[in-house]
Amino acid sequence: DKKEKLQGLSRGLRDPQSMINEKVQHLDHLENRLKQSVTNSLMLKQQKFRNAEAKLRPDILQRGFTQNQERLNNFEGRMNRAIAVHRARSEDRLKSVVRMLESLSFKRVLGRGYSIIQDTDGTVISSVSNAKAGNGFVVRFQDGDASAIFGKGAGKISKPQTKSQNNPATDQGTLL
């Protein structure tokens, strides 16, 4: 009975040799796929290397260097022009400021016949009340300075005579 039962159960089992052969066949298939995958990967890497090698030819590299040098020269020219324009504009602004400064300079006033009176310390004397008799002062003219001393003011200063007072024949009279 046990023997029959064992034989009945063994009929449901597969042959161990066929199972081993099936697994060996599967391993052979996996081995072939792995070999093919390695071969394909190697061929792909070789193709990428050949593409990179083709790009590294001296003439192509030289062309790239030449193009970059041209771009650099173009940028340099543009930069030099921008600097020249900036410099010209700055010079124009500076000249304008210099002209404005010169127009406001007290030396221009001296050029129109005015003078500046300063005491010996360099302080401007702008009022008669600051002019003390016996004190020294400097008169600044357009073309230089002259030193003087304030007097007591007792004498009168005579006005210069005009040509009409010297020669009555040239006197034209008044219009009104």
Image (cartoon, helix red, strand yellow):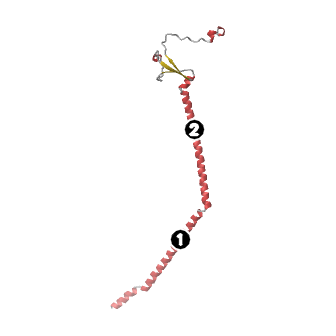
Residue at 53% x, 71% y: name it.
42
The kind of residue tagged 2 is Arg
Task: State left or right for residue 44 relative to residue 1.
Answer: right
Amino acid carrying mark 1 in the image:
Leu
Q: Is residue 32 left or right of residue 176?
A: left
Secondary structure of the residue carrying tag 1 is helix
Q: Residue at x 55, y 25 (%)?
A: 107
**Residue picked out by circle 1:** 42
Asked whether the viewer can see residue 31, the reply is: yes
Q: Residue furthest top?
A: 168
Query: Residue 169's spot in the image, x, y percent?
Result: 66, 8
Tag 2 residue: 89
127 relative to 76, above or below = above
The mark lying in front, picked from 1 and 2, is 2
With 115 as the anchor, is 167 left or right in this view?
right
Image quadrant in which you'd find residue 101: top right
